[in-house]
Amino acid sequence: MARRDIPRHNGDANTSSDAVAQHDETSPLLAAAQPVHGNVPPGAKAVPGLFWIEAALFTNVFLAGFDGTVTASTYAVITSEFQSANLAAWISTSYLVTTTALQPLYGRLSDIVGRRACLLAATLLFGLGCLGCALSPNLGLLIAMRALAGAGGGGLMTMATIINTDLIAPEQRGMYQAGQNILHGVGAILGASLGGTLAGWLGWRFAFLVQVPICLAALVVARVVVPKSIVPRRHRAIVKPDVDGDGDGIDADVESVVGGNAREPSTATATVTRPMSTWEQVDFLGAVLLIAGLSLFLAALSAGSNNGGAGAGAALAWAQPSVLGCLGGSIVLLAVFFAVEARTTAVPLLPLSMLHGVERVSLLVANVCLGMSGYGFLFLMPLFFQAVLLDSAAVAGLRLVASSLATPLGGLTTGLAMKFLAPRYAASGPNALLTALARGGALVLLAGGVANLALGMHDPSWHYAAYLTVGGFGQGMSYPASLFRFIGACDFGEHAVATYLVYLVRSVGSVAGVAAISTIVQTHLLARLTDVFAGTPGGAELIDTLTHSVEALRDLPADTRVVVQGIYYEACRRGLYFLLAVGSVTVVCTLLLSTKPRK
C-alpha cells in the first residue's frame, strides 16, 4: 500500500545527542518515546517518569470535566447573589467562547514553543481563572475570569492528547485514551454533585477555589516531570501529523471500523510543503475575530431578551440601537472571519474546503446540534430544579449525576458496538455500522427530549433521574459515532483535520445552545411576569427582583410563589421544546447519511 511521502522517525535505539537534535515536523516529543519500533519490547516503560507525567495530564483532564458541570449546578446561586440572574448565560458562554476559539491554537503553538510550555500555560491560565472567579467582587469580573479560565481550559484536554500521542506506543494509546475519557466523566459527575454541595454548604466561591490547589499540584508536577522539548515545524503541511503512526489521524483500535487504511491517499491530499515561518502558521486573526463575533452575538441576545416585556415591549427591546448594533457588528465580524479563513496562509481555524457534500454538511450540522443539546441541557435543567422544584444547589447538582454518568456509558456502548459488531458489517463496510450507531444515538437523544417534556412539577424524584438519563445516554452514543462517521466521509489525508473540525463545530454549538436557551427562558419569563404583575402594587419592583434573583422565589408569599413557579415551569418547557427541535434536526441529519461503502 502506498504511504504518504513524508519523513518518519524510525524509532531506532539511537539516543545520542546528534540523533536527538535531528527533529523534523513529524518528530515526536521524545525520540525514545517510540518503544514498539526499536529494541524496546511492547509494553515496556521507556519514558522516564511516565507515571508522574500521566498524573499531571490526567489531573488536567479531570479538571476539564469538573469545571464543565460545576457551573451548571451553581450559576443560579451565583447570579442571585449578584442580582443578575438575567445574565446567567454569560458564566457558561464566556468560558465556551474562549475555549472554542483558542483550543485549535494549542496544537500549532505547541509545535513552535514546545509541549511543556503550552501545557504549563494552559494549566496556569485555568488556575488563575478559577482563583479569579472565587475572588470576584462582581459579576463582570467573574465573567472575565471565566473567559480567562476558558483560555486555559481549551488546552487541558488538547495538550493531554498531544503529549500522550508523542509518548505512548500506538497499540497502547487506546488504553490511555480510555483513561482520559473515564477521568473526564468522573470529573463531570463530581462537578455536578460536589459543585452544588459546596455552594450549599460553604458558598459557591469554594466550587472554584477547590480547583486551585489541584491545578497548582498539576502545574508543579508537570514543570518537574514533563520533558522540555520544542518540535519545530518549519514547513506548513496540508496533511497533519498522524495519531497512531500510520498516517490516518485516528487510533489503531478503531481503524477497522472507520476504514482508515482502506483508501489510498489521493493526489489532492498528498503532502505539499512550502517554506513558512512557524508563527505565520498560527491563525491568531481568526481566533480574535471568532471571539469578538461570538461575544457581540451573545451581547445582542442578552440585551434583547432582558430589556423587553410582553407584546410590543418585547419587539421594541429587540429594536433597540444597542441590540441592533451588537447584531450588526457580530454579522460583520463573523463575515470577516469566514473571509479570512478562506484566504489565510496560516492553518485555518475553520477549514472551509471541507464544507462540501451532503454527508459532510449533514454530519457537521448534527454535531452542532449535539453541542447545543448537551450544554443547553446542562444550563436549563439546574434552573428547572432550583426555580420550579425549589431545590437547593446541592440537590440540583445531585439530580444531574445520573445523566452525567449516562453520557460516558453511552460512549462506551458505541465503542463496544464498534468493536464487536464490526464483523457483522464487514460485507457492507464501516459506514453502515457507523451510520446505524449515529442514527441510534440520535433517536435515543430524541426519546430523552420527549421524556423530559413529560416531567411535571410534582413528580417522584426517580422520574427526574430516569428521564434525564435517557437523553444523556443518547448524547454519549452520538458523540463517537458522529465523529468517526465524519472521519469516514473524508479523504485519507483529511482525517486529523476532520477530527479537529468536529470538535470545533460542537464547541460553537455549545455556545449557541446556552445562548438560545437563556434567550428563550428570559424572554418568556419577563413577558409573563409583566402580564401577571404589571400594574399591581409593588409589581414593577417584584418583576425586577424575580428577573435578577432565582433565590428571591423562596421569600415570596405562598400564593405568589406558586404563580411564579408556574411561570418558570412554562419558560423551562419552552426551552425543552427547543431542545426537542434540535434533537429532531439531529435525527434528520443522520437519515441523510449513506450506508454504502465510500468510493
Image: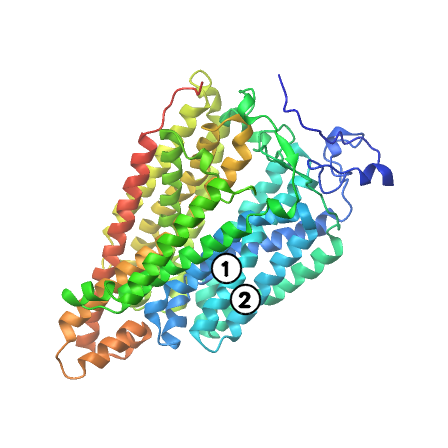
400 sits left or right of 558 in the view: right
Give the tally of numbered discs.
2
53 sits left or right of 524 in the view: right
Image mark for residue 130: 2
Residue at image point 27% right, 47% down: 580
Is disc 1 surrounded by few (<14), some (14 to 19) or many (20+) residues within 10 Å?
Answer: many
Whether the residues at callouts 1 and 2 have beta carbons within 8 Å, the answer is yes
Q: Nearer the viewer, residue 467 or 101?
A: 101
- Residue type at numbered disc 2: Cys
Image quadrant assignment for residue 329: bottom left
Image mark for residue 67: 1
Q: Position of residue 214 (x, y in %)?
A: 61, 63
Viewer-side label of 1, 2: 2
Q: Please state, as top left, top right, bottom left or bottom right, where the C terminus lies in the image.
A: top left
Q: Does residue 296 show up?
A: yes
Disc 1 to disc 2, C-alpha distance: 9 Å
331 sits left or right of 578 in the view: right
Is disc 2 surrounded by few (<14), some (14 to 19) or many (20+) residues within 10 Å?
Answer: many
Q: Position of residue 164 (x, y in %)?
A: 65, 43
Pick whichever of labels 1 and 2 is earlier in the sequence.
1
- The answer to whether residue 273 is above or below residue 461 is above
Q: Position of residue 398 (x, y in %)?
A: 41, 60
Q: Position of residue 200 (x, y in %)?
A: 43, 72
- Residue type at numbered disc 1: Asp
- The answer to whether residue 303 is above or below residue 297 is below
Tell which residue pokes out farthest to the left in this image: 535
115 sits left or right of 142 in the view: right
Q: Does residue 566 show up?
A: no
